[in-house]
Image: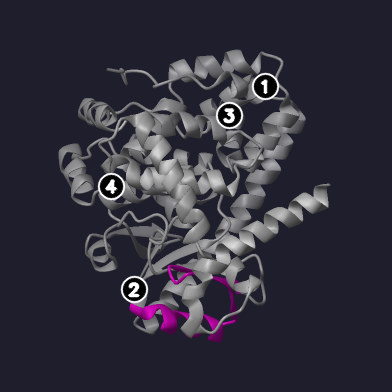
């Protein structure tokens, strides 16, 4: 049985650069003495600061880096690096202030038209978890509403200078302000896309009843309860692994919440996770946070993870996978992404030996991908009336074969 008294595994050698270790050590609001000593040692090494800034910007962690470097290591950091970080910090603070004002306006608008709404991520996390609106980088606003209010909310936003940018199969709609394209709003009817990530989170009414108050820019709003927020953040980290889009920001969010909530009733929380059938994504995310950022976990949580890994060893595989993909530049092919999505969803329900299960799952997934996984590209390849939409299941193999042959001809 593996021990979780220390991280499950060290970073893979291929990504174990001092710049990456330095980034991971600094992306937190509290730095313990041991980590501080390690940072001092790393800074004295031959750091490729250009690469360091590149990965810091790409992962949206410059606010945390600037605060820590400015406070503790200002004399050890090249002036040009501090200047760049300072510029990112103040630009981010200015943008966050703008978006937080717009969020308050939208919440008042929804309230006036009797649309219950719960804001999350963005300025809400920056304020509630990091304690400073400028300390978290975000690019849009996220608001959860009831599914039955989706049409009303859409009409309301369009009437107030927003344009519908994208509709993600009904679970989320993205709007852009017509006068300021930097203001982007995601209206969620569900917290996750159930069509391919079917882990059911609490419904809106439950989240609303358990919500708590938060002061944002001097005004009172509501946010998810601590337990709900922890579960939601964990599911979002797992979804990032599922979609091969590793996010250090999301991992930091979960880590910071674990750090500030020292009085959690873990027994009650683990029971809630089990009742929601979320053990798999929840434990994957906690293991990732423990492994990548070395965040300590309570003994009962370690024991629960160890027990779950014995039942489902692929949980540990996902933690290692996140480590490997977090700083990889190459994108994972869609085929592999979808396979891992299916594996995450169904892996915990199989009693087959791991190797046999993996082979079986891959073969069955391939068949489904070719025959049943119809999408917008199939509809664009050949348009059919809605009464004949079932024929898209036959068109998909033809389209994939056509694409394959075309690509071969273009490359020859």
| Residue 166, placed above or below residue 370 | below
Task: Tell me which segment is drawn in magenta.
Answer: 148-176
The residue under the point 71% across, 15% down is 46
The answer to whether residue 333 is magenta is no
- CA–CA distance between discs 4 and 2? 22 Å
The answer to whether residue 157 is magenta is yes
Q: State how many labels appear.
A: 4
Q: Does residue 262 appear in this view? A: yes
- CA–CA distance between discs 3 and 4? 30 Å
Which mark, residue 75?
1
Dot 4 or dot 2: first in sequence order is 2
Dot 3 or dot 1: first in sequence order is 3
Residue 341 on image: x %, y %: 44, 47
- CA–CA distance between discs 3 and 1? 18 Å
Dot 3 or dot 4: first in sequence order is 3
Residue 328 on image: x %, y %: 62, 34
Residue that numbered label 4 is attached to: 278
Mark in the foreground, 3 or 4: 4
Which mark, residue 142?
none
Kind of element beneath mark 2: loop
Mark 2 neighbour density, 10 Å: few (under 14) some (14–19) many (20 or more): some
Kind of element beneath mark 3: helix
When asked about the image quadrant of residue 359, the answer is top left
Label 2 close to label 3 by CB (< 8 Å): no
Residue that numbered label 3 is attached to: 23
């Amino acid at each position: 049985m593996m021990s979780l008294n220390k991280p499950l595994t060290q970073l893979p050698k291929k990504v174990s650069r001092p710049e990456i270790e330095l980034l991971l050590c600094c992306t937190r609001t509290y730095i313990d003495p041991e980590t501080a000593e390690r940072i001092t040692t790393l800074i004295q090494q031959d750091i490729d600061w250009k690469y360091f800034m590149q990965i810091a910007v790409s992962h949206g962690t410059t606010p945390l880096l600037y605060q820590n470097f400015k406070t503790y290591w200002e004399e050890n950091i090249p002036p040009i690096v501090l200047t760049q970080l300072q510029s990112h910090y103040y630009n981010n603070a200015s943008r966050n202030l703008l978006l937080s004002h717009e969020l308050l306006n939208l919440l008042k608008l929804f309230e006036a038209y009797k649309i219950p709404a719960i804001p999350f991520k963005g300025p809400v996390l920056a304020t509630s978890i990091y304690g400073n609106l400028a300390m978290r980088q975000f690019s849009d606003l996220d608001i959860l509403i009831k599914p039955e209010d989706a049409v009303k909310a859409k009409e309301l936003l369009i009437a107030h200078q927003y344009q519908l940018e994208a509709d993600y199969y009904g679970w989320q709609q993205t709007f852009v302000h017509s006068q300021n394209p930097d203001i982007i709003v995601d209206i969620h009817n569900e917290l996750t896309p159930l069509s391919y990530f079917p882990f059911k989170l609490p419904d809106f009414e439950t989240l609303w009843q358990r919500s708590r108050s938060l002061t944002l820019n001097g005004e009172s709003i509501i946010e998810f309860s601590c337990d709900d927020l922890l579960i939601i953040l964990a599911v979002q980290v797992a979804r990032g692994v599922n979609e091969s889009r590793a996010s250090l920001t999301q991992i930091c969010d979960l880590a910071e919440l674990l750090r500030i909530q020292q009085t959690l009733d873990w027994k009650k929380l683990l029971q809630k996770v089990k009742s929601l059938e979320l053990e798999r994504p929840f434990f994957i995310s906690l293991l990732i946070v423990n492994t990548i950022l070395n965040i300590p976990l309570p003994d009962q949580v370690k024991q629960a993870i160890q027990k779950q890994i014995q039942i489902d060893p692929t949980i540990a595989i996902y933690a290692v996978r996140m480590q490997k993909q977090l700083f990889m530049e190459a994108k994972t092919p869609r085929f592999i992404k979808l396979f891992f999505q299916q594996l995450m969803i169904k892996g915990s329900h199989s009693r087959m030996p791991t190797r046999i299960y993996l082979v079986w799952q891959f073969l069955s997934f391939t068949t489904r991908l070719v025959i049943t996984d119809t999408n917008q590209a199939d509809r664009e390849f050949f348009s059919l009336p809605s009464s004949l939409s079932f024929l898209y299941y036959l068109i998909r193999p033809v389209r994939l074969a056509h694409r394959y042959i075309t690509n071969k001809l273009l490359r020859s």
